[in-house]
Amino acid sequence: MSHRRSSLLVTAALAVCLVSCASPREPDWEKASGQAGDFVEAAQDDDGHLGSGWLRVSPEDSPPGDEEGVTLDFTSGATSEGLNVVCFGNGTISFDVTTQSGSSGDRGASVDVECDGTVKPVELGEPLEGVDALRFNGIVADGTGAVVAASATGTAE
């Protein structure tokens, strides 16, 4: 009976190990949100800061619609030069940004961002004048989720 009990314990221990090794852990959402909030707060002191924000993305999320994500509105128009993006959590995020301008149309960019806490610049090409709004969002390309933050750079009119 003792031998049978030992076999069951070994089998149970192996099963627990396989389950914990096979499924990656979810990010520490509180920590990742705090890091994103710190990035957004620090960005407000940067030269050329137009606005910033952050959002949480999970693998279960549906691809964002055109009106979803974080929107930065500029009441008098702005000249948008680019973004600084950072991701906290686990994996890689597919990050999208779109500028909206009544006078010169819309412009967008997409970039994959590793969730390693490193700030990555996203260039939008030539500076775009008369920007009324800038929207960004993201989806999990790989991993268990993350919090992504971005700060827009340029000049306000």
Image (cartoon, grey):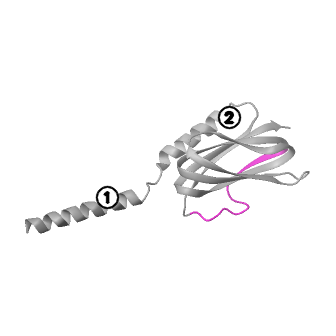
Reading the image, the residue beneath label 1 is 17
Three-letter amino acid code at the position of disc 2: Gln
Foreground residue among 127 and 13: 13
Residue found farthest to the right: 103
Q: Position of residue 49 (x, y in %)?
A: 73, 36
| In-image side of 28 versus 8 (left or right) | right
Q: Quadrant of the C terminus?
A: top right
Residue 70 in sight in this render: no
Queried whether the magenta region covers residue 88, the answer comes back as no
Magenta residues, start to end: 61-76
Three-letter amino acid code at the position of disc 1: Cys
Q: Position of residue 109 (x, y in %)?
A: 75, 52
Q: Upstream in the sequence, badge 2 or badge 1?
A: 1
Secondary structure under tag 2 reads loop
Foreground residue among 6 and 57: 6
In the figure, residue 138 lies in which quadrant? bottom right
Q: Residue at x 54, y 64 (%)?
A: 60
Q: CA distance from mark 2 to mark 1?
A: 45 Å
Mark carried by residue 128: none
For label 1, count other residues whose C-alpha is less than 10 Å away and answer few (under 14), some (14-19) or many (20+): few
Reading the image, the residue beneath label 2 is 44
| In-image side of 136 versus 13 (left or right) | right
For label 2, count other residues whose C-alpha is less than 10 Å away and answer few (under 14), some (14-19) or many (20+): some
Q: Quadrant of the N terminus?
A: bottom left
